[in-house]
């Protein structure tokens, strides 16, 4: 086992002159207890004309046989992603060792610094990103973006990929910690002020090319309309009360896309048509910071109406961004149309011009949520004012 290098993280970037640079983070296995305190992983890079060429050159310089069957995360730089990621997917899809369950993320930060992060409870950055992705996808602050999800999106003519965004962040200093202490501990694992990792938001694509970033709120809006939202928590400001807020959790969301029936036989009927996205869901109250405790039936109905309006506004803003800023059908309307019309109609008459047709649609969200749970109390300890 000492002769095998288990790659845990693979990063792909653009080097000078348009060449491809790959970064690999490899575990350092050891059968000797006294070697357990050594660096658990090492990171190196290689350049080539393509991903395969760079990997080939890296293999020729490595004393260990590099094994790609344990890759936890595949990281694309923003620069590489904007130029198109299909050129990197071919070699990975052909690799019999590569895991289709590997996470695929995009970063605007240097990949080498990302792989250098050492968390308090996990010294290997690739494993740390894997753990955070599991949490972020459960809370819907980032999309479920495994390699197999990416391949599936690219293979569906009416779908567009959405990949999670990973960023470097500075840890906040502990209370009472001096500036000198922060400087001395910079770059140390678990120290305040060192760089950490955050998974939040997503990278939007048109075909295989990245077209822009989405923040967590926009990402959740996409997941709602694509029926991929698992659970999403947010704060709602009570109308008419400057300091009144309610913390809620949205789940059980179901979205239905409806378009003119004649579009099934007449593709021209869809251009400029009104498309309705009907969203229904459940809301649980997690926290109430307001003089009105939202415990009566009338208060709950008013809260549900306010939440529905807020979500509807968020969806409308995302729809505008998708149509007029990104120019990409990240909502998945094209895939819905493709499934409902004859394949010959989609392939010959709709697919070639769908990119332009999507921008002409009048997409109207219709949201209605129901407040289901109020927590473990029927009366808040905070007195109603």
Image (cartoon, rainbow, N blue to C red):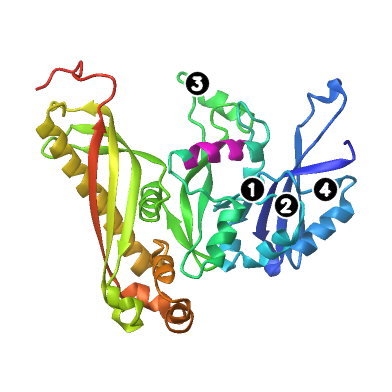
Q: Earlier in the sequence, mark 3 or mark 4?
A: 4
Where residue 260 appears, x then y in whole percent? 27, 72
Q: What residue would you read off at disc 2?
A: 98
The part of the image, by quadrant, that contains residue 222 is: bottom left
Where residue 344 appears, x then y in whole percent? 47, 81
> Does the CB distance between marks 2 and 3 fall below 8 Å?
no
The part of the image, by quadrant, that contains residue 93 is: bottom right
Q: Secondary structure at mark 2?
A: loop
Q: Secondary structure at mark 4?
A: strand
For marks 4 and 1, give the one nearer the viewer.
Answer: 1
Please tell me how crowded label 4 is: few (under 14), some (14-19), or many (20+) other residues with Cα within 10 Å.
some
Point out which mark residue 66 bears: 4
Q: What residue would you read off at disc 1?
A: 102
Point out which mark residue 328 bears: none
Name the residue at 55% across, 65% down: 154
Q: Secondary structure at mark 3?
A: loop
Name the main secondary structure of what is drawn in magenta.
helix
Q: CA distance from mark 4 to mark 2?
A: 12 Å
């Amino acid at each position: 086992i000492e002769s095998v290098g288990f790659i845990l993280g693979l990063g792909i970037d653009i080097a000078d002159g348009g060449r491809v640079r790959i970064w690999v983070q490899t575990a350092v296995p050891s059968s000797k207890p006294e070697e357990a305190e050594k660096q658990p992983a090492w990171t190196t890079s290689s350049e080539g004309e393509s991903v395969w060429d760079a990997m080939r050159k890296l293999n020729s310089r490595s004393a260990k046989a590099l094994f790609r069957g344990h890759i936890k995360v595949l990281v694309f730089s923003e620069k590489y992603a904007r130029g198109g990621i299909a050129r990197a997917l071919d070699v990975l899809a052909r690799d019999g060792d590569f895991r289709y369950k590997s996470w695929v993320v995009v970063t605007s930060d240097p990949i080498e610094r990302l792989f250098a992060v050492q968390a308090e409870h996990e010294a290997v950055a690739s494993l740390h990103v894997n753990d955070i992705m599991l949490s972020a996808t459960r809370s819907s602050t980032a999309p479920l973006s495994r390699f197999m999800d990416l391949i599936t999106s690219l293979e569906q003519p009416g779908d567009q990929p959405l990949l999670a965004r990973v960023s470097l962040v500075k840890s906040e200093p502990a209370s009472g910690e001096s500036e000198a202490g922060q400087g001395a501990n910079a770059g140390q694992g678990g120290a305040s002020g060192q760089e950490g990792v955050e998974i939040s938001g997503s990278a939007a694509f048109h075909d295989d090319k990245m077209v822009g970033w989405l923040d967590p709120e926009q990402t959740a809006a996409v997941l709602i309309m694509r029926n991929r939202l698992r659970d999403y928590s947010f704060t709602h400001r009570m109308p008419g009360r400057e300091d009144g807020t309610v913390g809620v959790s949205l789940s059980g969301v179901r979205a239905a896309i409806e378009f003119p029936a004649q579009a099934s036989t007449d593709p021209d009927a869809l251009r400029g048509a009104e498309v309705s996205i009907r969203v229904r869901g459940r809301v649980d109250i997690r926290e109430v910071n307001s003089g009105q405790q939202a415990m009566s039936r009338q208060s709950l109905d008013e809260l549900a109406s306010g939440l529905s309006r807020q979500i509807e506004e968020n969806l409308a803003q995302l729809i505008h961004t998708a149509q007029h800023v990104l120019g990409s059908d990240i909502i998945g309307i094209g895939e819905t149309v493709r499934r409902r019309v004859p394949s010959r109609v989609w392939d010959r008459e709709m697919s070639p011009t769908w990119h332009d047709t999507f921008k002409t649609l009048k997409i109207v969200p219709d949201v209605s949520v129901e407040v289901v749970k109020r927590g473990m109390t029927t009366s808040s300890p905070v007195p109603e004012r």
